[in-house]
Image: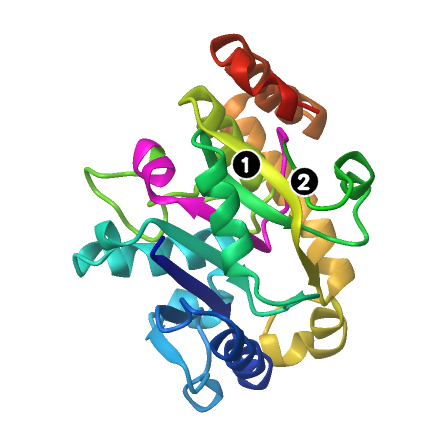
């Protein structure tokens, strides 16, 4: 399975370089490693920089997860390289792995589960690990969005093809801070017969200390301010787009398609939570 790894960086080249070097040292597929500079300053680019979002809005506000991953995937699509990959491993630069390698176990789960469109490594801190046990995968109606491997066919079933931009290629870029962006993507997947899973065959953690201690370098809001804006702006986005007034409604929307998936594919019932 040929995998493209896309890492997002914004003004933390040391963190990104360390992550890239670990991936290169441990992974057979690390040659296909791409770094999106999501509005980074020219003097704070990763040594592994592939593309830099350098227009004024990107430099001022950054791209965040939705626009950043859209931008990286779009560059591969526009260059004609997108179709050459079987899967895409999307991760933020504050992702840390416990255990090596990380790509092979995730790719192995995609190969073992033919209708699994997205698989995310579990975290030791998540309650989901209690549902999974060691070295197992189950299908969920929600995932975390700091690290996930997506099958190309899954992306192709939901992506924008008529007029793709960094605002719409896969994620909805108008949802700037990514409020329930992963829930929306998971719901689209189940509606198109693609499941989303969490696995303990691979482990990952989000190192929140970078945002807590270095928000000024990242040119973002403090952790507390960002969390408030994440919810406030996100609820406004969700109300405009779906008419939902709570996160619970968004989750139930995804769960509806989750339940329908197992009606259409009862053979995958053993992986239902």
Q: In this picture, is 128 found above or below 270? A: below
Q: Nearer the viewer, mark 2 or mark 1?
A: 2
Q: Is residue 122 magenta?
A: no
Residue 215: tell me if it is visible: yes
**Dot 2: element:** loop
For the residue pair 64 and 33, the one nearer the viewer reads as 33
For the residue pair 195 and 184, the one nearer the viewer reads as 195
What residue occupies the far top of the structure in this picture?
263
Q: Position of residue 6 (x, y in %)?
A: 43, 63
Q: How is the image coloured?
A: rainbow
Question: Where is the C terminus found, in terms of image quarters?
Answer: top right
Q: Is residue 150 magenta?
A: yes
Question: Label 2 vs label 1: CA separation?
Answer: 35 Å
Q: Position of residue 79 (x, y in %)?
A: 18, 61
Q: Position of residue 222 (x, y in %)?
A: 72, 67
Q: Which mark is first along the chain, 1 or 2?
A: 2
**Residue occupying the point 57% across, 80% down:** 12
Q: Is 141 placed left or right of 152 in the picture?
A: right
Q: In this picture, is 238 found above or below 17? A: above
Q: Position of residue 44 (x, y in %)?
A: 49, 87
Q: In this picture, is 98 found above or below 150? A: below
**Residue occupying the point 36% across, 73% down:** 31
**Dot 1: element:** helix
Q: Which residues are magenta?
A: 139-157
Residue 136, which numbered label?
2
Q: Is 124 placed left or right of 154 in the picture?
A: right
Mark 1 neighbour density, 10 Å: few (under 14) some (14–19) many (20 or more): some
Residue beneath label 1, please? Answer: 237
């Amino acid at each position: 399975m040929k995998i493209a790894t896309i890492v997002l960086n914004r003004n933390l080249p040391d963190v990104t370089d360390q992550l890239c070097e670990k991936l290169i040292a441990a992974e057979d597929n690390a040659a296909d490693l791409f770094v999106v500079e999501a509005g980074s300053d020219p003097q704070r680019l990763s040594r592994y920089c592939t593309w830099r979002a350098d227009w004024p809005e990107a430099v001022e506000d950054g791209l965040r997860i939705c626009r950043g991953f859209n931008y990286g995937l779009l560059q591969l699509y526009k260059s004609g390289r997108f179709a050459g990959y079987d899967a895409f491993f999307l991760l933020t630069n504050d992702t840390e792995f416990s255990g090596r390698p990380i790509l092979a176990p995730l790719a192995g789960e995609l190969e073992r589960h033919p209708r699994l469109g997205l698989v995310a490594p579990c975290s030791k801190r998540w309650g989901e690990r209690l549902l999974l046990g060691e070295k197992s995968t189950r299908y969920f109606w929600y995932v975390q969005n700091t690290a996930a491997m997506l099958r190309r066919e899954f992306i192709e079933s939901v992506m924008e093809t008529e007029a793709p931009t960094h605002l719409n290629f896969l994620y909805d870029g108008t949802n700037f801070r990514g409020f329930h962006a992963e829930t929306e993507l998971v719901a689209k997947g189940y509606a198109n017969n693609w499941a989303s899973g969490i696995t303990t065959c691979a482990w990952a953690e989000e190192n929140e200390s970078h945002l807590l201690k270095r928000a000024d370098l990242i040119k973002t809001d403090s952790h507390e301010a960002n969390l408030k804006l994440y919810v406030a702006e996100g609820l406004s986005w969700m109300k405009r787009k779906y008419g939902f007034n709570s996160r619970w409604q968004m989750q139930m929307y995804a769960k509806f398609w989750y339940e329908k998936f197992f009606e259409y594919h009862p053979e995958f019932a053993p992986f239902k939570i």
